[in-house]
Image (cartoon, helix red, strand yellow):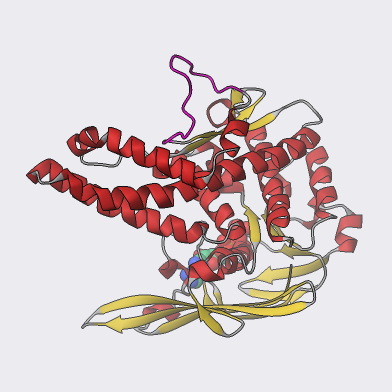
Amino acid sequence: MHLSHLSLTNFRAFTRLDMDLPGRILLLVGDNAQGKTSLLEAVYYLATFSSFHAQNDRQLINFVAGQSAQAVTRLVADYQVDTHKHRLEVRLILEAVGANGTRLRKEILVDGVKRSANEALGKFTAVILLPQMTHILEGGPEERRRYLNLAISQAIPGYAQALADYTQAITQRNALLKQLNERGGDPGQLAYWDEMVASRGAVLIYNRIHAIEELERLAARTHDRLTHGAEVLRLVYHPSFDPLPMPEGQYTLPMQTTLQRTSLGVEKIRQGFLQRLSEIRGEEIARGVTTIGPHRDEIRFLGNAIDLGDFGSRGQVRTTLLSLKLAEVDWLKEKTGHWPVLLLDETLAELDLQRRADLLEYLSHCEQALLTTTDLHLFSEEFVAQSKVCRVESGIVSLE
Ligand SMILES: Nc1ncnc2c1ncn2[C@@H]1O[C@H](COP(=O)(O)OP(=O)(O)OP(=O)(O)O)[C@@H](O)[C@H]1O
């Protein structure tokens, strides 16, 4: 997949940007606060319809444009998959409602036809690595679930829809549990929501089992290369509802557990989940909340059997993140048949010399990568010579 042209209107500091993206590797060079990260954010937004660091879409609208009651932020990607040319457009439309209020509407067009976000996901794919993404390892479990959801949504059609349905079903089920707890009533009312939670949840669990197993295989291989065989990386899935619970009294995860879970089909997981929900119904009514399910899943990263989220050094965490992200690139290629666009924000500055060289070597087999840097000297002359260099200054991008 190759992004050939990017057009932005009223996106963050870019009131208007039109840029061609020639070549395989594009180096975006500029001082701090010039718009480099925002550019990567725009490309990633076109792949996931979600920002990695904005709390909400309103933050993406240019400050000045957003002051008027009506504003339109537009992101357009012209991209090519094999020999086929496509256009993806996202419009964020700020509209006046009532006397003083505003509302934000999102429109997505794929090749000129309006689509829902769930339909458009996976058409244009990207993987992003930002320095602050170490929170995937070090932050709370919700960070890891979010990471996994975004990665799987791009690769597996139907996952994003199942996630949206599941999230809605959990909200409704929790409201009903709370009501039953406070005011009593017929617990049979839960049956419909139990079905919804179990059927959509099973799709999530099934895909997470496979994604984690496949990402682990790819990440472990890259990690072995990046650490020169010094560290064995494992990704361990702890599903909140485990379709294959550990034998009683056993607390460590047997090495073959992941493999055992991959043999389970969606229907088997659904039945087990439904059964478990009915077993703990009384307890859940007493607590007024859904206590098991993918909304409470956890994934841990182990380096030589040590939990890196809790005990990893800065360097170990950064290297693991790099292994994970490069695995995600390979995985998306395996799943969709196309290379995602790789977006690396200030990544080299964080790596030692050997790992920089390893990363640059890896880039030679990607179809397209965009890298930002404040310092072009971090790259070898040979690498710069093979790349296109763009200068980013106050929201203006010019080819050097
Ligand atoms: N909604 C917005 N409207 C206008 N400007 C914005 C908006 N959001 C952020 N900015 C500004 O855009 C500028 C560029 O930010 P960005 O993070 O892209 O810079 P950068 O070149 O990556 O810098 P650094 O090297 O420090 O990471 C910042 O000064 C920021 O205040």
Where is residue 89, by image quadrant?
Answer: bottom right
Q: Is residue 306 magenta?
A: no
Q: Nearer the viewer, residue 247 or 367?
A: 247
Q: Is residue 21 above or below residue 148?
A: below
Q: Position of residue 344 (x, y in %)?
A: 68, 55
Q: Is residue 4 left or right of residue 133?
A: right
Q: Is residue 215 left or right of residue 352?
A: left
| Quarter, ligand 1 | bottom right
Q: Is residue 252 above or below residue 32?
A: above
Q: Position of residue 245 (x, y in %)?
A: 46, 27
Q: Is residue 390 left or right of residue 184?
A: right
Q: Position of residue 107 (x, y in %)?
A: 47, 78
Quarter of the image where the C terminus is located: bottom right
**What span is colored magenta in the figure?**
240-254
Q: Main secondary structure of the magenta part?
A: loop
Name the residue at 63% across, 39% down.
Answer: 213
Quarter of the image where the N terminus is located: bottom right
Residue 384 in view in this figure: yes
Residue at the far left in the pictured view = 183
Residue 374 in view in this figure: no
Q: Nearer the viewer, residue 203 or 131?
A: 203
Q: Is residue 112 left or right of residue 361?
A: left
Q: Position of residue 221 (x, y in %)?
A: 76, 37
Q: Nearer the viewer, residue 309 or 289?
A: 289
Name the residue at 80% across, 28% down.
Answer: 229
Name the residue at 63% across, 33% down.
Answer: 259
